[in-house]
Amino acid sequence: MLVLLAGIFVVHIATVIMLFVSTIANVWMVGSSNLGNVSTGLWLLCNQTCEQLPVNSRDEASLKAVQAFMILSIIFSVIGLVMFIVQLFTLEKGKRFYLTGAIMLVCWMCILIGVSIYTARFTGKVPESTSSHHGYCFILAWICFCFSFIIGVLYLVLRKK
């Protein structure tokens, strides 16, 4: 049981770190242009230097929603980690980690909404680029989506023995 708890804890920490990286780094879409590689994220457009991400007024609300949901997912994941540690030391034997599981499923839902909006609205849209593809931050966000769901379900069924 201790090994299972330690494994879930390590995966939870990895998920928090990957969420931070995927939200902060600016490599959600990568393209190539005559000036070199161009990458865009949730915040900046980078080629040789980084500048504010140019977004038309039609897509501005979508980008702000993606930013908000990714930040919310980080917040809920950190809260879930803290709640797991608190419940680990205060929960009686035989009880389940319901609160931690519920928080992680809310985190999972925030990631799902944020990345789905980004996929629908911004896939293939890299300014000044001829060809584009998804970057590692986009892939990390989908990996965090899977991990947060698995962790949330494991917390719901996990009993403290």
Image: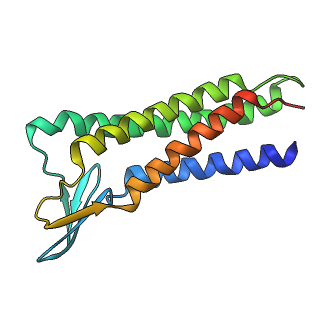
Residue 125 location, x and y as percent?
A: 18, 54
Residue 91 location, x and y as percent?
A: 82, 25
Q: Quadrant of residue 83?
A: top right
Q: Compared with residue 81, is residue 11 higher up or lower down, i.e. above or below?
A: below
- From the viewer's side, name the closer residue of 111 and 82: 111
Residue occupying image coordinates x 29% and y 33%: 65
- From the viewer's side, name the closer residue of 28 and 49: 28
Point out the image quarter for the C terminus. top right
Report whether 87 appears left or right of 140.
Answer: right
Q: Compared with residue 65, is residue 129 higher up or lower down, i.e. above or below?
A: below
Q: Quadrant of residue 117?
A: top left
Residue occupying image coordinates x 18% and y 66%: 131
Point out the image quarter for the N terminus. top right
Q: Compared with residue 67, is residue 141 higher up or lower down, i.e. above or below?
A: below
Residue occupying image coordinates x 65% and y 35%: 82
Report whether 134 appears left or right of 154.
Answer: left
Q: Quadrant of residue 5?
A: top right
Colour mapping used in the image: rainbow
Residue 7 location, x and y as percent?
A: 75, 50
Report whether 85 appears left or right of 127.
Answer: right
For the image shown, how many numbered marks are present on the structure? 0
Residue occupying image coordinates x 24% and y 40%: 63
Residue 69 location, x and y as percent?
A: 38, 34
- From the viewer's side, name the closer residue of 71 and 40: 40
Report whether 64 appears left or right of 115.
Answer: left
